[in-house]
């Protein structure tokens, strides 16, 4: 898998990445089923709403055009299920931390998937962030 592309806000170039039409992400998520994980008796969820946000912010084929101070993109070859699999893998790598921190607060975990470092963010047990770290 190729490393992600990074774009910076003060750069006028976005490495050829163009803003996607809003219906494209909806179409991509049409068959996506939420994934629920139990760690230490606590429920963690990857749902359509969280996945939509992740794809619109970080997938080059589904990007909504928004840019933060440092913008990172997933590999364009990643499918929705690849993204969910990567999140699942990082959650399993951080099992003990998830059990300890639980589902009452917002926090981030870090892990490696296919040689790339990623950040996964949670808000009360729901995945709402996933992006590659440089």
Image (tube, rainbow, N blue to C red):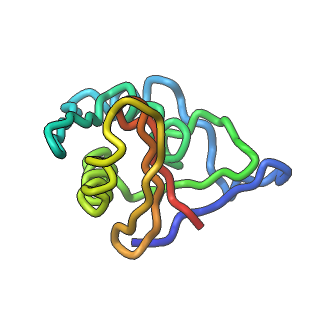
Which residue is more in the foreground, 92 or 46?
A: 92
Marks counted in the figure total: 0
Residue pushed farthest bottom?
115
Vertically, is 21 above or below 59? above
The residue lying at 31 percent from left, 59 percent from top is 94
Horizontal and vertical percent for residue 116?
44, 70
Vertically, is 95 above or below 21? below
In the image, 109: left or right of 125? right
Horizontal and vertical percent for residue 100?
31, 48
Vertically, is 66 above or below 3? above
On the image, which quarter does residue 7 sit in? bottom right
In the image, 99: left or right of 41? right
* Quarter of the figure with the N terminus: bottom left
In the image, 106: left or right of 94? right
The residue lying at 38 percent from left, 68 percent from top is 112
Vertically, is 46 above or below 108? above
On the image, which quarter does residue 102 sit in? top left
The residue lying at 36 percent from left, 55 percent from top is 78
Horizontal and vertical percent for residue 111?
39, 64
* Quarter of the figure with the C terminus: bottom right
The residue lying at 85 percent from left, 50 percent from top is 10
Horizontal and vertical percent for residue 37?
17, 41
């Amino acid at each position: 898998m190729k490393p992600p592309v990074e774009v910076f806000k003060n750069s006028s170039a976005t490495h050829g990445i163009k803003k996607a039409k809003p219906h494209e992400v909806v179409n991509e998520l049409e068959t996506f089923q939420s994934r629920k994980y139990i760690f230490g008796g606590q429920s963690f969820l990857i749902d359509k709403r969280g996945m939509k946000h992740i794809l619109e912010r970080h997938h080059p084929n589904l990007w909504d055009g928004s840019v933060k101070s440092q913008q990172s993109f997933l590999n364009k070859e990643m499918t929705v299920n690849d993204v969910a699999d990567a999140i699942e893998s990082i959650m399993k790598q951080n099992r003990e931390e998830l059990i300890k921190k639980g589902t009452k607060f917002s926090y981030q975990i870090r892990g490696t998937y296919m040689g790339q470092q990623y950040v996964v963010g949670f808000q009360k047990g729901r995945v709402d962030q996933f992006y590659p770290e440089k």
